[in-house]
Image (tube, rainbow, N blue to C red):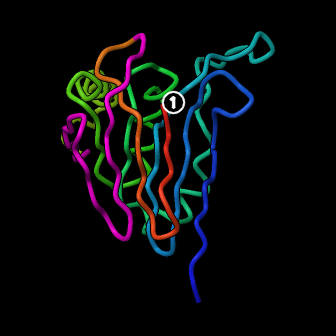
């Protein structure tokens, strides 16, 4: 029986911030971005809002990697919280990794996360999927779109 491709947004749809998407095929998951959002006025005492990672917690043995499109807070702000739950390599460009390293240091996770630097044009493979990093212009340097190659076809995520 052929597997189904699942694209599961855990945040970032119909809202500003918390960008996070799961791409799943069979026994393999890639996570795209892990952002945060600032709380609304009705969330008194809340400093930041992160995506609900319950699905990833339940399927953490399938997570092959976390790929980051760029270094804005709404794409990287939740990474320290996710990395406390998931043991998977994190892939990002040089500037984005620099921003992430500072966040991980603040949370005491500097030496616990496997971080892999990629460049536009690079392709990483894990499980039955691969992710190609494509240079794009954005308001922050070192941003990439992604072409996720799956057995069901290619998904383009612009970041």
Instruction: Note whether 98 is above or below 1 in the view shown.
Output: above
Whole-percent x, y for residue 62 in the image? 44, 67
Picture residue at 28% right of the left edge, 33% below the top: 108
Label tally = 1
* Image x and y of residue 14, in percent: 74, 29
Give percent across and percent down for residue 27: 46, 74
Quadrant position of residue 39: top right
Residue 111 picture quarter? top left
Q: Which residue does the numbered mark 1 point to in the structure image? A: 35
- Which of the pair 137/97 is nearer the observer? 137
The residue nearer to you, when weighing 67 against 5, is 5
Q: Is residue 49 left or right of residue 125?
A: right
Say whether residue 13 is magenta.
Answer: no
Closer to the camera in the image, 103 or 135: 135
Give the left or right position of residue 88, taking residue 5 as reference: left
Q: Quadrant of the N terminus?
A: bottom right
Give left or right: position of 127 versus 112: right
Q: Is residue 7 above or below residue 71?
A: below
The verdict on residue 117 being magenta is yes
Specify few, some or many for label 1: CA neighbours under 10 Å numbering under 14, 14-19, or 20 or more. many
**Residue at position x 59%, y 17% from top?**
47
Magenta range is: 113-139
Element on which disc 1 rests? loop
Q: Residue at x 49, y 33 (%)?
A: 158
Q: Position of residue 125 (x, y in %)?
A: 28, 60
Quarter of the image where one finds residue 112: top left
As drawn, 38 above or below 20: above
The residue sitting at the right extreme is 42
- Which residue is at a point 46% across and 61% down the rendered structure image? 29
């Amino acid at each position: 029986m052929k597997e189904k491709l699942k694209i599961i947004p855990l945040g970032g749809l119909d809202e500003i911030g918390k960008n996070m998407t799961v791409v799943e095929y069979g026994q393999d998951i890639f996570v795209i971005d892990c952002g945060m959002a600032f709380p609304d006025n009705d969330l008194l005492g809340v400093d930041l809002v992160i995506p609900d990672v319950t699905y990833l917690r339940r399927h953490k043995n399938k997570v092959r990697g976390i790929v980051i499109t760029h270094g804005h807070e709404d794409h990287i702000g939740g990474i320290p919280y996710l990395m406390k739950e998931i043991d998977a390599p994190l892939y990002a460009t040089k500037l984005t990794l620099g921003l992430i390293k500072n966040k991980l240091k603040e949370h005491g996770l500097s030496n616990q996360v496997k971080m892999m630097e990629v460049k536009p044009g690079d392709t990483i493979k894990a499980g039955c999927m691969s992710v190609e990093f494509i240079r794009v212009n954005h308001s922050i340097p070192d941003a990439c779109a992604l072409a996720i190659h799956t057995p069901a076809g290619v998904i383009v995520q612009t970041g």
